[in-house]
Image: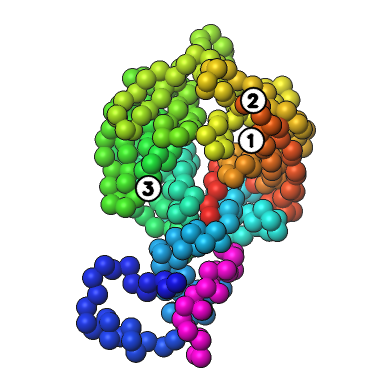
């Protein structure tokens, strides 16, 4: 296995000659052996590897590095959390290694507007921060900011077509879909929907949603994006929601049973939608699309007594990560027991003392 040293598809004779005369990654060892060793460096330690030499940095930051790592099943999931620091009134990103329970602070974002929305491409190690409310104008922004785990850096990308804040976003078939939210003071709530292509760094308008929602939660199951407003107080009407099919570029109403049972924070594991309810003792539920019903998940109850709200939730590989105030993390291991029924076991990871004043805003899972 050899990791390409250049992302360019066309190499000139000069670059080929330079590559032949380049210094080995480690004197006395073939480069492919060194590359195999570098592939086994955990994400948190890659910053040290990048600082060893420019040639090591080139290997680690090359896009094919993570692709090869995924292909060899060497990449591992890490939990990335944005949190509001009460003492400094600032937003900070940090990552948790769920195996060692160690936290790592990320570099600050170029911009940090409130009301932003996050979405990720986990296997590509990419985290996107979209929109928000500008501190100088108090209007929604069009910003698109991306974090790459392979470089540990933020970059500013092409802006969204529509300024928006407090909206829904999800990744469908490798593209980012943004839905609704609040616009500028002149436009108010919006129904516009757009799609972002990370490969071309371009935004494209797609079919609009039929109605504006009071608030937004979303989940991507399979190749469809489900959007709902959930229950809002005072409870007078059944919550609204829709389903976007990117293959047909169409919207349809989601079922009433799905909307009415969507009573909390959503997380998708495999092809199943789970919800940690915001009411009572916060039971975990799973949606059964064949029967159009919600079922309670067996096993242990969600540790609501130890997890102070607000919560930020995400999941991957059969595990749910719920982050609460103080960055305490509840890890739920979900297993299927047959007939569409599931069970869960919860484990609590206490947050560091330095994070005791942090309120979790968003949780994403990236591989590194």
The answer to whether residue 107 is seen in the rendering is no
Lateral position of residue 2 relative to residue 357, left or right: left
Q: Which residue is mark 1?
A: 310
Earlier along the polypeptide chain: callout 1 or callout 3?
3
Distance between mark 2 and mark 1 Cα atoms: 33 Å
Where in the figure is residue 204, as x and y percent of width and height? 26, 39
Any magenta on residue 31? yes
Q: Please state which of the two labelled residues, at mark 2 or mark 1, is closer to the viewer.
A: 2
Q: Which residue is mark 2?
A: 339
The answer to whether marks 1 and 3 mark residues whose Cβ atoms lie closer than 8 Å is no
Earlier along the polypeptide chain: callout 3 or callout 2?
3
Where in the figure is residue 83, as x and y percent of width and height? 59, 46
SS at badge 1: loop
**Mark on residue 195?**
none
The answer to whether residue 119 is seen in the rendering is yes
Distance between mark 3 and mark 2 Cα atoms: 42 Å
Q: Residues within 10 Å of mark 3 (few under 14, many from 20)?
A: many
Query: From which residue to which does the magenta span run?
Result: 25-46
Relative vertical location of residue 33 with respect to residue 242 in this rendering, above or below? below
Q: Please state which of the two labelled residues, at mark 3 or mark 2, is closer to the viewer.
A: 2
Q: Give the residue furthest to the top.
A: 236
Q: Which residue is mark 3?
A: 144
SS at badge 2: loop
Q: Residue at x 57, y 35 (%)?
A: 267
Distance between mark 1 and mark 3 Cα atoms: 25 Å
Q: Residue at x 48, y 55 (%)?
A: 125
- Of residue 49 and residue 84, the one placed in the foreground of this image is 49
SS at badge 3: strand
Earlier along the polypeptide chain: callout 2 or callout 1?
1
Determine the image quadrant of residue 330. Answer: top right
Where in the figure is residue 219, as x and y percent of width and height? 49, 32
The answer to whether marks 2 and 1 mark residues whose Cβ atoms lie closer than 8 Å is no
């Amino acid at each position: 296995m050899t990791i390409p040293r250049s992302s360019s598809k066309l190499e000139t004779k000069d670059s080929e000659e330079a590559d032949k005369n380049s210094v080995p990654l480690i004197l006395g060892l073939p480069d492919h052996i060194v590359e195999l060793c570098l592939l086994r460096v955990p994400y948190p330690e890659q910053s040290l590897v990048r600082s060893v030499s420019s040639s090591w940095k080139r290997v680690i930051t090359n896009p094919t590095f993570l692709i090869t790592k995924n292909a060899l099943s060497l990449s591992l999931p890490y939990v990335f959390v944005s949190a509001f620091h009460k003492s400094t009134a600032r937003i900070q990103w940090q990552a948790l290694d769920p195996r060692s329970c160690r936290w790592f602070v990320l570099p600050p974002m170029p911009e940090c507007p409130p009301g932003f929305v996050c979405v990720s491409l986990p296997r590509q190690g990419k985290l996107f921060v979209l929109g928000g409310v500008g501190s100088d104008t108090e209007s929604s922004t069009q910003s698109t900011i991306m974090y790459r785990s392979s470089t540990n850096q933020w970059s500013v990308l092409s802006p969204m077509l529509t300024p928006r804040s407090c909206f829904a976003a999800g990744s469908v078939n490798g593209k980012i879909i943004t839905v609704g939210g609040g616009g500028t003071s002149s436009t108010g709530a919006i129904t516009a929907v757009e799609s972002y292509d990370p490969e071309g760094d371009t935004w494209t308008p797609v079919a609009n949603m039929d109605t504006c929602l009071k608030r937004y939660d979303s989940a991507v199951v399979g190749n469809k994006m489900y959007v709902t407003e959930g229950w809002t107080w005072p409870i007078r009407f059944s919550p609204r929601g829709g389903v976007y099919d990117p293959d047909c570029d169409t919207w349809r109403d989601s079922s009433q049973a799905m909307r009415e049972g969507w009573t909390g924070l959503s997380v998708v594991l495999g092809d199943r939608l789970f919800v940690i309810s915001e009411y009572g003792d916060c039971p975990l539920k799973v949606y059964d699309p064949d029967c159009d019903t919600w079922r309670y998940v067996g096993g242990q109850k969600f540790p609501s007594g130890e997890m102070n709200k607000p919560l930020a939730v995400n999941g991957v590989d059969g595990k749910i990560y719920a982050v609460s105030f103080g960055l305490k993390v509840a890890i739920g291991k979900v297993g299927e027991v047959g007939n569409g029924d599931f069970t869960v076991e919860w484990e609590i990871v206490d947050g560091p003392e330095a994070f005791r004043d942090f309120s979790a805003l968003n949780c994403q899972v990236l591989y590194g």
